[in-house]
Image (cartoon, grey):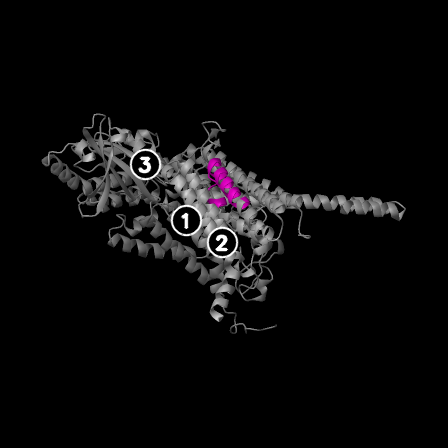
Amino acid sequence: MGLATGDLGTREVASRSGGLDATTRLGVQIAPSPHLSDTWFTTQRLMGEVLIALMPVIVMAVLVFRWNAVRQISLCVLACLAAEAIFARFRGRPAPLHDLSATLTGLILALSLPWSSPWYVPVLGSVVAIGLGKAAFGGLGCNLFNPAMVGRAFVMLAFAREMGASAYVLLDSELSVVTRATPLSLAKQFAADLAAGRVTAGEAQVQMEMAESIWALLIGQLNGSLGETSAVAILFGGAYLLIRRVISWEIPVGILLVSFLFVELGHVFELTLLGPLQHLITGSLLFSAFFIATDPVTSPLTSKGRLFFGMGIGFLLVVIRLFSSYPEGVMFAVLLMNATVPLLNRWTVPQPLGGPVPAKAGV
Amino acid sequence: MPDGPTASERFLNGILPENPVYRQLLGMCPVLAVTAAMLPALTMAAATAFVLISANVIISLIRGQLRPHLRILVFTLTIATFVTIADRFLAAYLYEMSKVLGPYVPLIIVNCLIISRCEICASKQTVRVAVADAVGMSLGFTLALVSIATVREVLGSGTWLGLRVLPEAWPNWGIMVLPPGAFLVLGLLLAGVEWWGQWRAERAALAVASVSRSLQGQSGGAAREEEASSWKA
Amino acid sequence: MTNSRKIRGYLQQAWLVLLLAGAYGGALAGVQMTLAPRIAENRRRETYQTIPQLVPGADRERTVELWISDREGNPARVYRTHDAEGRHNGWVLPASGPGFADDIGLLIGLDASLKKLTGMYVLDQRETPGLGDYIRDADFRRQFQGHAADTPIEAVKSDPQEQQIVVLSGATVSSSSVCRIINTAIARMRGPLLQSQAAASAAGGDAREQEL
């Protein structure tokens, strides 16, 4: 977790800076006070809850993309488990497959891939996710970056063609959703056309077409990565996580609020033709707000830190969506903000009950 | 000079034990910038070797006249001269390659490997030792560039030295040709070299331990001393 | 005299540096004098080698490098090409502009009357390997031949019509950047080139005379 001892300024936390790995072994939980012990709270249980919450998303992915979704998900999960076992062997430790973290990494990676990518994309992405994203840092709890996003970034840069906008579209497919470009690619293209002065009258028509599709976006009738087609399914899963208190509200709220504001701003200045609501439910924004950015290892410990973290992601992803050549910015936004987590932890040290810790207490 | 490592020690040290890239982490700029393919990597290695050997020879020849406070000036002057010569030669005889390498040939001037060898070895030891040192270090640098370029070119383009080594169906890993690939490969190879070094050290320690155990079982101090001294040697 | 002693002191300190500086300077001057013609020839050859690809029938050796003021009055380099008999048969414009990753440098070939595009060549590019760098491919470049030079070229995803080219799949930005660079360069230079041509024909000089 990259958290130096004493970052939180409290001795309780300083004594167990090892992250979740250490957490499960020692049976303690890293959090600001009050420290209530709870033996029920284990890595396995946490990951299991997220798996349950992912079920609606997985079901929708399989319904929309059929066999393609099954193939990507099984390849990713199997490759992640295999990689976890191999890298654990390298480090001379028993493979922690039962804690479900590798399964979850595989699922999230799979759900962020296009349906068409050939077998080596999910496999290599999974190996890199577990190897470079997690094992190289010292295993679960010590990784600075979200493993699934590390794996995705790697295959995105390695196989630009297999991961780019064209990978989502197949004109003569039996699946009707994949015969159209993804909404964000369309939005990007129309924005470029508008900027070049090629469309002015067409804008209204595009707008209308997009407005029509809010319903389609909600239930999952538009093209996209496997897990991002249906906003309703993601909201169901996210609500479950919030109710079960597996994730806290600060990160999703930070992301959604700030991205809403900045998209509105961009919309006013005609940088994008999609309205803020459409932006929120397109692409992997919602999926990342509930399932990716909330990874307990790579997000801040304190509630204030988590709020800043979410806001940072929201801001960066809007900047990438509106100004870069990439239609979607979630992956890079999450990775960039992951890098600030140690700093956020340090900046947002909570004040212990009874006043601040004296500078030289106990020395 | 009476003290200091001998020529053969200098030569061998440069290749692996004090490898400029994997052990000293010097010259990172060319290591990251020109290793997307083998040909530019080899050209860069050759140019660096030329500059390093020439600079070491000159500095070693004039080492008796060097004033301490002016020595860095002399080093820089010498290195810059040979870098300019190398750059002009590339532009004249390997024009395409000099375009590929771009600013990285002139940037050999700031490669710390060269000035560090002038300072550590050439300004203190004889020409023979300085040449051995420069050749050893150049070989070590070449080895590092070639190892990184091999991984990057094979995975990123399916070729090695421009020759196809992987089947046409190989999906080129674009990331390997891009800057992130350079950082990833360097990091992984550094880890690999470190791991190999630790493994060797552990094995050596185990061997020493087992020998000393077997010696303790024997009687006769003379034999033990003899064995121990042979180990030290 | 303290002054001369001071100077002697400096010389004692610095004679080696001065000597080396002199020697190195001489060596570099020698290298430069020996190699400079070869390097200049390499540079010239690179541009001139592509000229027959850009303007069909152009003779490499008869190409003339000119500096002409563009629409805003800034001097710009252009190449006036001639066939083997010395008849003026086309123009080559160097142009550059932002691509996906970095500036793209192009050579644009036009016919003598500046009505048609005759070719395009990519001199410098740093587009994404495996996607954008396909702008160098002959198949992509061939699309530009034969379009009219007086209306802009457009990049489309499929079904190219008049004045349209098909983008490389996955590299829309790189492809349309190339179009934009070409359009800007032609818009910038077309008027001045036509003017210079009119002036030349008014003066009654033919290409060969101008060359001399």
Q: Residues within 10 Å of mark 2 (few under 14, many from 20)?
A: few
Tally of numbered discs: 3
Q: Describe the element under mark 1 as helix, strand or loop.
A: helix
Residue lying at the far right of the rendered structure: B220
Element carrying mark 2: helix
Report the side of C49 relative to C10 (left or right): left
Could one spot residue B17 in this view of the protein? no
* Percent position of residue C190, x then y: 17, 39
Question: Nearest the camera: A109 or C62?
Answer: C62
Q: CA distance from mark 2 to mark 1?
A: 56 Å
The percent coordinates of residue A123 (x first, y second) are 49, 36
Q: Which span is picked out in magenta?
A: B30-53
Name the residue beneath numbered marker 2. C19
Specify the principal SS of the magenta part.
Answer: helix
| Measured Cα–Cα span from mark 1 to mark 3 | 44 Å
Tag 3: residue type? Arg
